Image (cartoon, grey):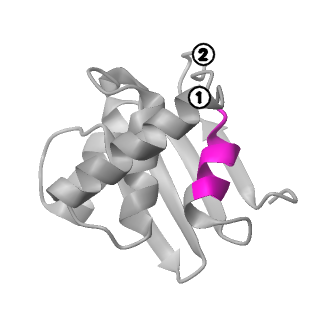
Amino acid sequence: MNSTKFSANNQTKKNPPKVKFNLIKEHILGKRYELSLVLCGDSLSKKLNRIYRKTDKPTNVLSFPISKDSGEIFINLSRLEPFGAAHLFIHGCLHLKGMQHSDRMWRVENKILNVASNRRWY
């Protein structure tokens, strides 16, 4: 990985979103956290969702902690709406921090979205 301990791999033919994922990652997870982002489509998303969540359909984002200081996020570019890539990435990062779906998580997501918007990270 590069010096920011962030890598991205676009496995689709779609253009990647214009999001400064590395800056959002550092804001949420810190500079030392090693994160890999995979931009994928329905096929891989469905396969991973079936294997790890026992749900036989594609989803928009999946997060996989690898260790205390590393993880991987998969964002399905075919399923960005209605959230958008920045929101899904933030959601995935918060899961890697250990947050579960809740009103608190929703409030934290929106707070970080506002920070990211003000700093023009997307």
Q: At 60% across and 23% down in the image, what residue appears?
A: 16
Q: How many marks?
A: 2
Residue, disc 1: 118
- Depth check: 15 or 101 in front? 101
Kindly state the secondary structure of the residue where label 2 is placed.
loop
Q: Is the residue marked by circle 2 packed among few (<14), some (14-19), or many (20+) residues within 10 Å? A: few
Above or below, 64 relative to 40: below
Give the distance between the C-alpha atoms of the residues marked 2 and 1, in whole angstroms: 24 Å
Q: Position of residue 19 (x, y in %)?
A: 61, 29
- Depth check: 13 or 111 in front? 111
**Left or right position of 104 against 17:** left
Mark seen at residue 39: none
Q: At 45% across and 30% down in the image, what residue appears?
A: 85
The C terminus - image quarter: top right
Magenta residues, dominant SS class: helix
Q: In which quarter of the image is residue 100?
A: bottom left
Q: Position of residue 92 (x, y in %)?
A: 40, 53
Q: At 28% across and 49% down in the image, what residue appears?
A: 107
Q: Where is residue 42 in the image (x, y as percent from the top left)?
A: 31, 31
Q: Residue furthest bottom?
A: 68
Q: Does the magenta stretch include residue 26?
A: yes
Task: Give the mark nearest the N terminus, 2 or 1.
Answer: 2
Q: Can residue 75 be seen in this view?
A: no
Where does the magenta region start and end?
20-27
**Left or right position of 25 against 95:** right
Q: Does the magenta stretch include residue 71?
A: no
Above or below, 37 relative to 39: below
Kindly state the secondary structure of the residue where label 1 is placed.
helix
Mark seen at residue 15: 2
The N terminus - image quarter: bottom right
